[in-house]
Image (tube, coloured by chain):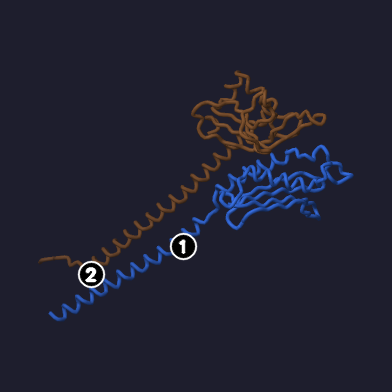
Chain colours: A brown, B blue
Amino acid sequence: MNLTASYSKKAQLKIQQMAFVLAAIIIFFAIVSILYLSISLRGLRGAASSLNEQEASELVRKLASTPEFSFEQNDCSNCIDLDKVLLLKSRQSYKEFWNLDFLKIEKVYPSQASLECEKSNYPDCSTITIIGKEDFGSPKSAFVSLCRWEQEKGGYTKCELGVIYASGKDIN
Amino acid sequence: MHQEKILTKMASKKAQEEVVGFVFIVVIVIVILVIFLGFMLRQDNPINSQESRDIYQFLDSAMQYTTSCALSYEPAYSNCISGETPCALAEKTLNDLIESSFKIGEQASNKGYDFKASYTDKDLEEEIISLSKGNCSGSLRGSELLISALPGAISNTLKICS
């Protein structure tokens, strides 16, 4: 008695076809998932970078509210006392106080020719550079108000528009 | 022999039909995927929110600016001593502040701006100052600063168009 199993070649072919189709579908959806994840992560990186930029800008602006910079006479958290800052510039002890590589205040309006402030030309100048090391990287900036005591017309507080720039490990 | 040839041809045609059907389904799925990706990629640009923070800081600082009318304004006469009205001077100063801070122009990256200051309370909304310049048909970024003016508030909005 010779027993032999007879296999359906047609059925085997059908199973093979189904296996190939399933493999193709799995590969296809794997490619789609990788594409979707890469696009999502790109958006996430952009959002993270944007948040870092915002945080850095706010850190720079907070410098204006520190006692070394703040203008006490106005109820204003982003007002910088320019008279105080000019005095700070000449004090060597404050060069390492903020742990920064670059710190500069610049008047935006009324606009003037770029001129570094010294005691001889103040307030007819536009820039006070407090810290200016070499290789300070890319500084972050924030709009602030620059206030000072004006002697004319009996004396009054005058505020102008300016920008504070800062660069350092804590900010970048 | 002839019958075998016919059967082989039929089998081959059937296989071709199945392959065509499979390719057709794959093409439809790819088209749907591309449309879906197109909708997904049209999401809000997160950079807009970062630059509007910059505009908020500008508005907050600009509101502290001391104009030439600040010392000489007398409400009884409604004008500054120089003869200008406070509103005219405020408009001129704001325009100068915005143009000094954000380079606005056809050749610049910022094509225009739109500034509005309005007083709102429970029942009233009154426009105080409205300034605009350039073309604002493209993308824009902006921010709003509220100043308390009891019983209402003054809303200052600035939009920069690029």
Q: What's the residue at 87%, 44% (across, down)? A: B75
Q: Residue at x 80, y 40 (%)?
A: B69
Using a 10 Å C-alpha cutoff, classify the residue at mark 1 as few (fewer than 14 neighbours), some (14 to 19) or many (20 or more): few
Which percent across, then down, holds residue A114? 61, 33
Left or right side of A24 for B128: right
Q: Amino acid at mark 2?
A: Lys
Q: Are marks 2 and 1 on the same chain?
A: no
Residue that badge 1 annotates: B35
Give whichever of B59, A28 is nearer the camera: B59
Callout 2: chain: A
Give the x, y percent position of residue B11: 23, 74
- The quadrant in which the N terminus of chain A is found is bottom left
Proximity of marks 2 and 1: CB atoms separated by less than 8 Å: no
Which of discs 2 and 1 lies nearer the camera? The answer is 1
Q: Residue furthest bottom?
A: B2
Looking at the picture, which amino acid does disc 1 mark?
Answer: Ile
Tag 2 secondary structure: helix
Say if B34 sits above or below A74 in the image.
below
Dot 2 surroundings within 10 Å: few (below 14), some, or many (20 or more)? few
